[in-house]
Image (cartoon, rainbow, N blue to C red):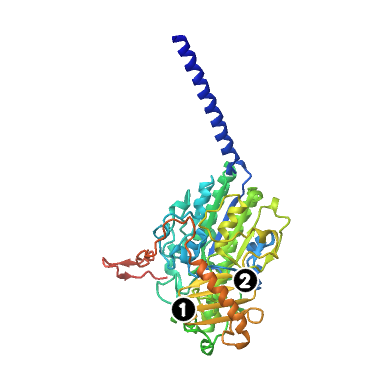
Amino acid sequence: MRQRIVQVLVFVSMLICSFSCVQNAEESKKVKSQPSAQSGKKFNVLFIIADDLNCDLGTYGNNVVQTPNIDRLAQRGVVFENAHNQYPLCGPSRASFMTGMYTNQTMITENNMNLRNSVPDVITLGQRFRQQGYQSVRIGKMFHYDNPSAIGTSGNDDIYSWDQTVNPYGKDKIEEYKINTLIPRRYGGTLSWLAADGKDEEQTDGIGANEAIEKLNSFSESGTPFFLAVGFFRPHTPFVAPKKYFELYDREEIKIPESSDDYLKTLPDPAAKSIRAKKIQLNLEKELAQEIKEAYYATISFVDAQVGRVLDHLEASGLDKNTIVVFTSDHGYHMGEHGHWQKQTLFENATRIPLIISLPSIENTAIKSKRTMSPVELIDLYPTLMELTNIKTPKHVVGKSLKPLLENKDAFVRGSALTRWRNGYSIKTKRYRLTRWGEKGVLGYELYDHKNDKSELVNLASNENYNALIDSLKLVLEKRITEASMKPDGLGRQNENAIPMSKAKNITFGDFHDENGKRTYLKEK
């Protein structure tokens, strides 16, 4: 009997072992069937974003600004001629494209708001790459920073998006007291500029480029798949760059747009206020305006040089053969157009952004030097990168993949690009822009025909010849607003009452303050 019991136990044990082995084999098969970042079949991603960069670039038709490196990237990629942000302000725009949602869905429409206070459960772009075995690394500004006061810190970063972070801090911060500005010690939201002494590598963005090169070296040696997000702080004010970049330009030849107050009478009140909000920056003397615009151009060229250094190293390391490169900005910037020197409007100058996507050279021969006029949005980058790297897109992402445009420049993924600013909404189609102010347009509309008026100076909203067009575009706009306001599937918690972080006054290194924060000594140039 005892022997028989032992035989039964042995038999049962063998059955259990056999079942377990089969089960383990099946689990192993399932794991191996999943796309593996370690397999080498997935692309890396180099995501480069400039701050406050409009489309004053060579590849976008500006014949004055010198941007040879960005232009070179455009030659081997796809240039999106009609790309727009979803909110022309740093913090809201960045929270939007890093989550793939509109600002009505992120609940972030101000700077200095913590992402997780508004949408605690959201999976950001960097976080999704982490979930799929990538090293997600941030260098510089990706989520919101108060620029320049928070340079060197993590700003309003999202710690769950990254495996590693680097916060460069350069000479531009140490010598902040030297910066020319329209208001003493006011830089970020005020026109300010400096032709700096020293080398590129001493500036914050030069240091950022150095850090990116070091990370690329590390990834090249280890073979680790990566999502490397490099956020340059320029050309955001203050417009600081080494002197050699100022020497690229003839200040006296720089043109300043003209705008009359009579033009304001043709606009809805909120639109007129948006381009007259910065009182101290209105009606600048021509020579001063030229000096400031020269500084903006010089700073763009400085950023272009840092982009070039990173791209050169990507190629030298051989990583270009397996790396998607994205170059863009968080929003545009007025340089005197409509009499305005800032962002925060619903005109083309503030909504339109440069966007270039370059696929790895081994896959790139079929799409070289393409340009598309399809309206696209910054939130489309999230699903695009997911599809290109064979990663499943989270359900909450409402952007559209741009892959069809990478394969066929004549394709369209959406009929219009939607941008919001406060109580205004604007759509840009291939040809027209319609802007609505107030609920159901109670505060007025704007209509611009880009075929005849690229500068958006002739508001056709009250022109009876365009009534049928306006009526049809209004239907499109209302539908877009409704969809952009719906809570996405799979988002989780969504808090409408989150408030911005309280801000302390900027401290310029070298100044002294008393125990109440009042400045007692101002460091001189």
Residue 196 vs 182, above or below: the answer is above
Q: Residues within 10 Å of mark 2 (few under 14, many from 20)?
A: some
The residue drawn where x is 70% and y is 55% is 364
Farthest left residue?
515
Observer-nearest of 512 and 421: 421
Of callouts 2 and 1, the N-terminal one? 2
Q: Secondary structure at mark 2?
A: loop
Farthest right residue?
366
Q: Could you say which quadrant of the image residue 328 lies in?
A: bottom right
The tag on residue 358 is: none
Residue pointed to by mark 1: 438
Residue 333 visible here: no
Q: Secondary structure at mark 1?
A: loop
Quadrant of the image for the C terminus? bottom left
Locate residue 14 relative to residue 506 in the image: left or right.
right
Q: Could you say which quadrant of the image residue 71 lies in?
A: bottom right
At which x and y percent is residue 403? 64, 58
Residue 398 visible here: yes
Observer-nearest of 179 and 77: 77
At which x and y percent is residue 423? 46, 75
Check disc 1 and give the amino acid type: Gly
Q: Residues within 10 Å of mark 1 (few under 14, many from 20)?
A: some
Quadrant of the image for the N terminus? top left
Locate residue 341 relative to residue 375 in the image: left or right.
left
Q: CA distance from mark 2 to mark 1?
A: 37 Å
Residue pointed to by mark 2: 65
Check disc 2 and give the amino acid type: Val
Observer-nearest of 316 and 270: 270
At which x and y percent is residue 480? 54, 70
